[in-house]
Image (tube, helix red, strand yellow):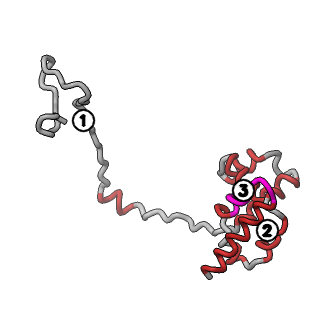
Amino acid sequence: MDPADGSLCARRGPEEWLPAGVICENFSVHFRLRRKCPSEASERAPEEKPHRKRIPALQRAYEFQALLESGAVNNKAEIARQYGLSRARVTQILNLLKLPAQVLDYIEELPREEQLWYSERRLRRIAALESGEEQMKEFECIQSTRQGSA
């Protein structure tokens, strides 16, 4: 911007200098839009995304653990390849099993619809805590939040 009048500045020649601290460059951006032919648009039906069934967070963690323990897979990387996930994501899911047994048992006993409320995101935050005592306190906190909203 030109400091004098607040307008955008452009260099008109090599002999013109801009004041110190003013950055001004000539640039252009090119966009190329592809238009669909009418015949092309009618030939293709709109693609529907497959409806993904929500799986309770712990169910998938137990599934992965069973694969590892049974020897069906050698490591987390194989699970990641089979499920189209990253190794880090598989580790995140398996880390849910680090929750205290009381928490795992409580969630497992709930009906499926209620298990879905305990999302992986909520449980992962609890599983990341160091001690079982801290995990139990945090779980009780989110339980009271759930019961307060119900």
Mark 2, other Cα within 10 Å: few <14 / some 14–19 / many ≥20: some
Q: Quadrant of the C terminus?
A: bottom right
* Residue at the spot 52% in from the left edge and 64% down from the top edge: 49
* Residue at the spot 43% in from the left edge and 64% down from the top edge: 46
Which residue, given by chain and number where applicable, does mark 1 sit on? 28
Task: Identify which residue, 126 or 117, lies in the foreground.
Answer: 126
Mark 1, other Cα within 10 Å: few <14 / some 14–19 / many ≥20: few
Mark 3, other Cα within 10 Å: few <14 / some 14–19 / many ≥20: many
* Residue at the spot 79% in from the left edge and 72% down from the top edge: 108
Q: x and y percent of residue 99 in the render?
A: 79, 61
Majority secondary structure of magenta residues: helix
Give the amino acid type for the residue marked by disc 3 in the picture.
Answer: Ile
Q: Earlier in the sequence, mark 1 or mark 2?
A: 1
| 128 relative position to 51: left or right | right
Which residue, given by chain and number where applicable, does mark 3 sit on? 93
Q: x and y percent of residue 88 in the render?
A: 68, 47
Give the amino acid type for the residue marked by disc 2 in the picture.
Answer: Val
Q: Decide: marks 2, 3 in contact (CB < 8 A)?
A: no
* Residue at the spot 32% in from the left edge and 54% down from the top edge: 36
Q: Nearer the viewer, mark 2 or mark 3?
A: 2
Kind of element beneath mark 3? helix
Q: Which stretch did the figure color magenta? A: 123-132
Which residue, given by chain and number where applicable, does mark 2 sit on? 103
